[in-house]
Each structure stands twice: as C-alpha cells, then as structure tokens.
Amino acid sequence: MTATPANPPDRLRIAMAQVNPTMGDIAGNRALIAATRARAAAAGADLVVFPELAILGYPPEDLVLRPSVQEACRVAIGELAALTTDGGPGMVVGTPWVDDGKLYNAAALLDGGAVAALRYKHELPNYGVFDEKRVFAAGPLPGPTAFRGVRLGLMVCEDMWFPDVAECLAETGAELLLVPNGSPFDVAKWDVRLNLGVARVVETGLPLMYVNYVGGQDELVFDGGGFVLNADRSMAVRQPEFIEDLLVTEWQRGNDGWHCAPGPLAEPLDRLPKIYEAMMLGLRDYVNRNRFPGVVLGLSGGIDSALSAAVAVDALGPDRVRCVMLPSKYTSQLSLDDAAACADALGVSYETIPIEPAVQAFGGMLAPAFNGRDPDITEENLQSRVRGVTLMALSNKFGHMVLTTGNKSEMSVGYATLYGDMCGGYSVLKDVYKMTVFDLSRWRNTARPAGALGPDGIVIPDSIIQRPPTAELRENQTDQDSLPPYEQLDAILEMLIEKEMPVRDIVAAGQPDDVVRRVQHLLYIAEYKRRQAPPGVKITARNFGRDRRYPITNAFRDQKK
C-alpha cells in the first residue's frame, strides 16, 4: 500500500475538461489542452483531468499503430509536461504510450515539469464499436498514483465497466477514483454509465469522477455528460451534454475521506432532443473537420429529406446548405409545394433541376437491350440514379458534400438504391428508425435545440409530416405498397437488430410469422448495400457497420421450429 504523506492536503480543486479534440491533429490537440489548462489555472485548479487519448483522438483505429504517430504523441506529452514547471495545475492526459515494445492506452499524470506517472488501461473493449485489442496491449492492474499528497486512482474508460481495477485501487490505498473516458453516445448510454459508476462507488467506498469527450468522429458522437459521485452515491456535479465544458470541482478531506462539494447539475436531455443534438454534432464535426464548405441534398417534399435539411441547417447554418428539388414526371404538385415551403422555412438555397430529360435519354439508350420486357423496378431505380448523378455533379463542381437522407428502417430492408439515393458522403438518419423520424420532426417544430443555427418555429410543414411516405417513382406509389406499416416494421427490426431475437420469439410477441420472416430475409439480403452506404451518426445500441457486422453471403434463416 502507498504510504500516506506526512502532511497531506485537506483541500483539492480538480477541473473536469470536457473537450473536443480532432483525430490526428496532435499539435492542435496539444494547443487545446494547454489553453484549457490555462483557463483552469485562472480558476484556481490544482489538477485538470482530460478524456481518454485526448492528445490523439478516439478511437484512433490503426492510425495509432504508426510509429510516427506514437512518437508525435510522446513529444507532445513532453511539451505539455514542461508547462507544469510554472507551479500551476497538474494534468491527467490520455495518450498512446510505448513501453518495452508494447503499445498501451495510457493516462499520463503530468506535474512538476515531468511525466510523473503513467497508468495503462487494463480492460480493453473488443465489442460493438470497439477494437482495442487489435491495437493496444492490456496494462496490469494499477495501483494509486501520488499527486501532491493525494493518492489518485486512475481508471481509463472501460476500467470502470468492471470491478477489478476499482477494487485493486481501493485495496492499495487510492483515495478517490478518476475516470478519463472516450465513451460514444447511444440513446440509452448515459444511464448505463451512471449505474456503473454507482456500482464502483458502492464496491470501493470511494468517490468517483467521470470525464468524457464531446464531439463527432466519423460515425461516433461523444456526448460529454461528465459527473462526480461522492462516496455516499450522491451526485455532486453533472456536466452538460453535447457541448464543451470546463468545470472546477471543490474537494475536501474529512474523517471519512474526500468529499466533492455540490456544484452545477446540468439537466439531462430527454430522448428526442438527445438524438437531435447527436445528429447535429456528428454532422457539424464531420463536415468541418473534412473541410467541406457545406452540404447539398435532394429535397423531395418527403419527411426524411426535410428532417435531414433541418438538422443540416441547425448544424451548419442556412448559408452552408443547398437544397435541390429533382422532379420527375411522377413528382406531385404537393411534393413541389411542400419542398418549397420547407426550404423557405429553413431559409436555405433552393433550386429545381428536372430529371426527365436524363431519364428519357437513358430510356432511349437502353430500349434495344430492354426490348420485349415490361417496365419494372429497373426504371424506378434509373430515376433515383439520375438524381444521384445530378447531386454528385453539383458536389464535384461546387465542393459541397452530398448528404443522403435514408433512414434506418429503409436501410435495414434495402428500400434504397445503390448509386442513387445512397450516393453521398454522410447520413444523419442512418441509425434513426422511421417512426423516430416522425417524432423528431414534430419535436423540432416545437423546440429549437441549444446551439442550433436554424430558425425558431415550424421548419417542417405539417403536410409533410401527415402525408403517407412515398418515393414517387411510379403513379400513386406509397412505401406501404412494398413494406409493412412502419409502426410494425420498426418494432420487428428493433427485435431483429438491437435485441437479436429469434423469429419464433418475435412471433410469440405478437408479430405475424410470414411478415417477420420476410423482414428478416430482406434484412439479410440488403447487407451488400449497407456495406456501400456512407457513414452516419450512431444513435442506437447497434448501428450498421461498427456494431453489427454480418456476412454479405449468408444463407442462414431462422427455422420454424
């Protein structure tokens, strides 16, 4: 056990740095960390805790295997350590670290001008969106870290998910637990984190500080929401979600150990604003960090494109969103009117480019090859692909990224056209089921999210929300001609995807056997399409791509018995 200092302090001020580093921008992240430390110093902090791998970004995937990246991170950590010669706050900074030929996910304690201590992540997640065992070695069970007379228990992210690390730290003399995190958002995640934090506090009798990232990294969004639990399980502070935040916490040592004084308790967001904020943040960081001037999308008069446009305007501002109506001969006047009204409400650039000349040209070109065959889905898909080509041409000419507008319900069952409406660089609705699209649209018409750059009031005309969904690729078409009602489809998909329930159990829950089997079949055979889909914001516990990785060639179907 670590010895107790002769004159241990009885007060400590720890700053929780909920920051948004950029993947791979080591110099920029070093500057962000240094500037945040300066702010914390001005507020009188003794220690600043940054998130997991803050110097590089999270998750780094195979980027972290490059020796040049490892060396650049090591140099940056040395430069940050040198700042602490000024007698100001120490820092806990997440970094990759090579030790004896092994690469670790480390938390570095910087103080007195040096790397005062290193603690390596013990529990490496290798499920869902995580592949850490691919790139990192597991560290040993850690002991406490001495900092100015206080024994800190450093646990890196997943180390809080299991009892071993916290118990080892408590048994070897840690006085409080600090948990730097890179914990991605999904709609139910915050309650999971809190429950795990409470479990570690109960097991150890120690207070716990949880510090998380905020920001978007490809498909992942980090929602922040850091918190402190005292040893009695009471919540002392809670940081806001989806925005950067620096919070200095006040700690005092008593006869029963360290206690954090009550501080700000940010109100937790409800489900719909939480999802909307995640979509905004994911899109904003993806567009800005990949240096696109803005986005372009097809505004069809349907609810998916209307909601996608609203999110884009709220994330980027109306001047960076270009909306295009691409009517065919099947496009109704109602769609034209609704799209124009939505564009007007959002204040975006809006133009009309009819696709019929190109559709006719393709029809004539293919007529000899199609001779003797009746029109079918081939001609419908041609319309979608002409629209995709048109949007990509605008993107190439003006530099705007094409934003696709398909939702999770459609992507699940292949109700989307490769090289057509799937053309694009990013999708904000990729992990959002259709019924949630309706809910989000109604919610956005009644509320303006924090930090939104779009207007107040109704931004999606009610006629769009009330209208039966249709792709308008043939006369009088509706989605329900090809699919079960979305209420039923979404319920079945959630059981198949998020819960991995067997067909027999879904049928036992009240869904028709033939419908469930058809949906499962469509889900499996659309895998090849999803492999070619653009990235999109992770919202649910199992998004396509990182979370759910099924083979494309797959003959398995649930048996009837």
Image (cartoon, rainbow, N blue to C red):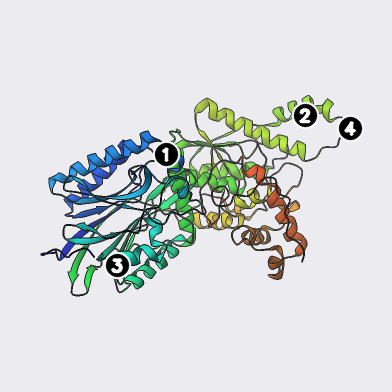
Closer to us: 354 or 203: 203
> Reading the chain from its start, which is encountered first: label 2 or label 4?
2
Of badges 4 and 1, nearer the viewer stands 1
What is the three-letter code of the residue carrying label 1?
Leu
Which residue carries the number 2 mark? 363
Q: Give left or right: position of 398 versus 511.
A: left
Q: Give left or right: position of 10 versus 279.
A: left
Q: Which mark is residue 170?
A: 3
What is the three-letter code of the residue carrying label 3?
Ala
Closer to us: 498 or 307: 498
Image coordinates of residue 457 in percent, x first then y, are 47, 52
> What distance separates the C-alpha of mark 4 from that of mark 1?
57 Å
Q: Are marks 4 and 3 in contact (CB under 8 Å)?
A: no
Residue at image coords 70%, 45%: 553
- Seen as rendered, the residue at the extreme front is 100
> Reading the chain from its start, which is encountered first: label 1 or label 3?
1
Question: Within 10 angstroms of label 4, few (less than 14), some, or many (20 or more) residues?
Answer: few
> What distance separates the C-alpha of mark 2 from that of mark 3?
73 Å
> Reading the chain from its start, which is encountered first: label 4 or label 3?
3
Tag 4's secondary structure? loop
Q: Is residue 499 above or below residue 473?
A: below
Q: Give left or right: position of 39 versus 302.
A: left
Tag 3's secondary structure? helix
Q: Are marks 1 and 2 in contact (CB under 8 Å)?
A: no
Of badges 2 and 4, nearer the viewer stands 4
Rendering quarter of residue 73: top left
